[in-house]
Amino acid sequence: MKKVKYRKDVHYFIDMVGMASDCVGSVTIDNKYALIQVHPTYSIAVVPPIGTNHPTFEEVVFYTNCLTYEHDLPAFISPAVRKRKALVQPIEKGQTRYISNSYFDSIGMACEAINSIRLGPLGYVWFKWPGFDKEVDLPYSKKYLGVTKEISLYSAAIRQLDPLSEFLNYYRVIESVSGSDGKSWISKNLPKLKSYDFGFLEFGTDAPFARARKRRRINVFSVYRRRALARLKKLKDNLPRRDITEYFYNENRCGIAHGRSNVKIYDFKYNVENISKDCYILKLLSRIAIADKIKDVRSSTCITAGNRPIRK
């Protein structure tokens, strides 16, 4: 089989901040584009074969959200240096290229700060399908086409440094899937947290103590599950006469989103700590919501296809 050659004139990079370097092998998306990781960084290029068109910007946005959802990392799109243009102009004046480069460098540093808080200063995750032993294709358009809005909302949550904003964006995922205020949906799906299969996302670290010890592989989602269940138990103990869904919606969601009464403020202490813990529960619930909607879309597609009239 003739080896496919890919273009070198890349227009955009997906910066998967917190991704291990050199962990993407022979990987393609939608049997159209190659994913090529820039050595030795977390930047990934979506590259078409020679003689074919580059992906549209909208496609790159979609693929960024897919990768963000699957790897639970804050990602952003960085144009090639010659195409960079700051989306927000600072007060400081300077050469266009200087201001534009500073803008995208700052976005990257902000995402690194988010990861430092969530994973640790030297923590990272591995690409889920490395493609070193065999070629791997990720059929993202087929898999995620029915949940483009939800994975976009999830991606917005992952990019938040502020836990109040993170919580609100997870809740928006649940509202989108449930088509309501989400309270009944949460009540129905909270019991799933204990046994739901969230997949395996391997955590790594360059911390000296970790390198000095042989450790078993750590699944990021297993850590999140333990923390979510511990928080859920504490909420049940502390809210014996109150529905947890009421706490999530009325106190947290509405208290964060609105500014008239019972406002949840960023107090640099209690609210930050408590809602950060609540985010583990909402994160996993929003992932359940997305995964369940994907199943529903597939089921409805199969039913529709099965009912098509046969042309003679």
Image: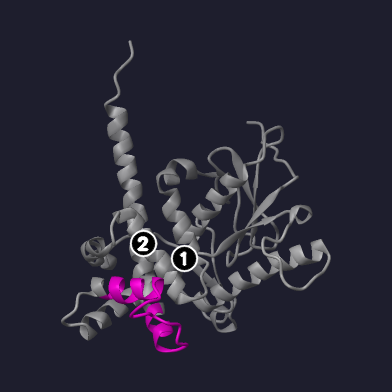
Q: Is residue 49 above or below residue 131?
A: above
Query: Mark 2: which amino acid?
Result: Ser
For the C terminus, the quadrant is: top left
**Residue ranking furthest to the right:** 95
Whether label 1 touches label 2, CB < 8 Å: yes
Q: Which of these two is toward me, 306 or 168?
A: 168
Q: Which of these two is toward me, 304 or 178?
A: 178
Query: Mark 1: which amino acid?
Result: Ala
Q: Is residue 72 left or right of residue 86?
A: left
Name the spot of residue 203 as percent of width and height, x first: 50, 69
Residue position for label 2? 286
Q: Residues within 10 Å of mark 1 (few under 14, many from 20)?
A: many
Res 306 label:
none
**Residue ranking furthest to the top:** 312
Q: What segment is highlighted magenta in the picture?
A: 247-275
Name the spot of residue 11 as percent of width and height, x first: 71, 48
Q: Which of these two is toward me, 70 or 293?
A: 293
Name the spot of residue 156 as percent of width and height, x first: 49, 62
Q: SS for tag 1?
A: helix
Quarter residue 40 falls in? bottom right
Quarter residue 23 falls in? bottom right
Q: SS for tag 2?
A: helix
Q: Is residue 308 left or right of residue 42?
A: left
Residue position for label 1? 157
